[in-house]
Image (cartoon, helix red, strand yellow):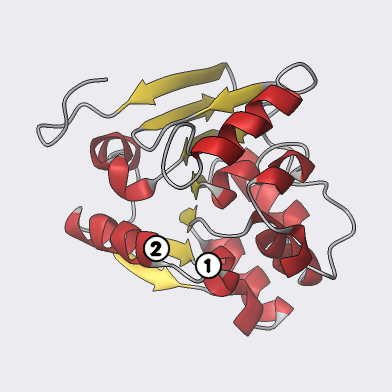
Amino acid sequence: MELLLVSYLAGTKTITANYLSKLSSKTITFIPTAGNVEPYTGFIDEGIAMLKDLGYQLHLLDISKFEEPVLVQELERATCVCISGGNTFYLLQELKKKHLTELLARRIREGMFYIGESAGAIITAPGIEYNQIMDDKTLAPALTDYTALNVFDHSVLPHIGEYPFETSSRETLERYRNSLKLIPLNNHEAVLVNDRGYTILRETDPERKAL
């Protein structure tokens, strides 16, 4: 198992390229579902453009728009899944509606490449309730169980110190720092998770100075 969790996909191009360098396929199953209830989705377009610039073909798969059998088939055969950012509660709601959380967790544990951006990173934790300060839970009215994929025993806190989440990310850190294993990430950091633990990575490509 080895997964890459980022705060902002377009801000971690070199890190992502290094992670994907071991991927045998040039096709990525890209799930933009979390952005369906967001007023701004430019970050999704930026992430897509970045992955295409790296030479990958994207198979777009909106969880909310396909029936469960189709989604199961797609995820069973995917070699790499990338779930982009947006509303974490809505994302988990749609995954649970189609009974995909256990399948997705199993595929990750089997070694499927997984990139999670913001909401896509948060759902790898045991639960997502800690993100209620940053995300609006009311956008997922059918979600009553906040149990997530539980493939990582830490909880990613994206966008720390980043606009427009400066206040909400800091409040989340203060409220949950003593009860959860939080990993705060800014928009140019990532956490690489495998069976041995995790490593924090910082983007140092020529377009950005090392942090």
**What residue do we see at 38% from left, 30% from top?**
189
From the viewer's perspective, is residue 114 above or below residue 71? above
- Residue bearing mark 1: 35
Quarter holding the C terminus is: top left
Disc assigned to residue 141: none
Q: Quadrant of residue 184?
A: top right
**Image quadrant where residue 201 sits:** top left
- Residue 157 in sight: no
Instruction: Farthest residue to the front: give it.
Output: 167
Disc 2 marks which residue? Answer: 44
Look at the numbered discs 2 and 1 and tell me whether their residues touch, using CB distance below 8 Å: yes
Residue 207: x and y in percent read 12, 37
| Residue at (77% x, 37% y) in the render | 126
Amino acid carrying mark 1 in the image? Gly
Residue depicted at 44% across the width and 21% down the height: 200
Query: Local crowd at mark 2 within 10 Å, few (<14), some, or many (≥20)?
Result: many
Left or right of residue 205, residue 164 in this image: right
Pick the residue in front: 102 or 191: 191
Q: Does label 2 or label 1 sit earlier along the sequence?
A: 1
Pick the front one: 94 or 131: 131
> Does residue 180 appear left or right of residue 3 in this picture?
right
Q: Nearer the viewer, residue 43 or 152?
A: 43
Does any portion of residue 109 appear in the rendered image?
yes
Please state if 96 lies on the left or on the right of 193 as rendered.
right
Per the image, label 1 sits on a secondary structure element best described as helix
Tell which residue pokes out farthest to the right in this image.
Answer: 144
Asked if residue 153 is positioned above or below residue 40 in the image, the reply reads above
Percent across and percent down for residue 44 are 39, 63
Q: Residue at x 58, y 64 (%)?
A: 34
Identify the residue at the far left of this view: 206
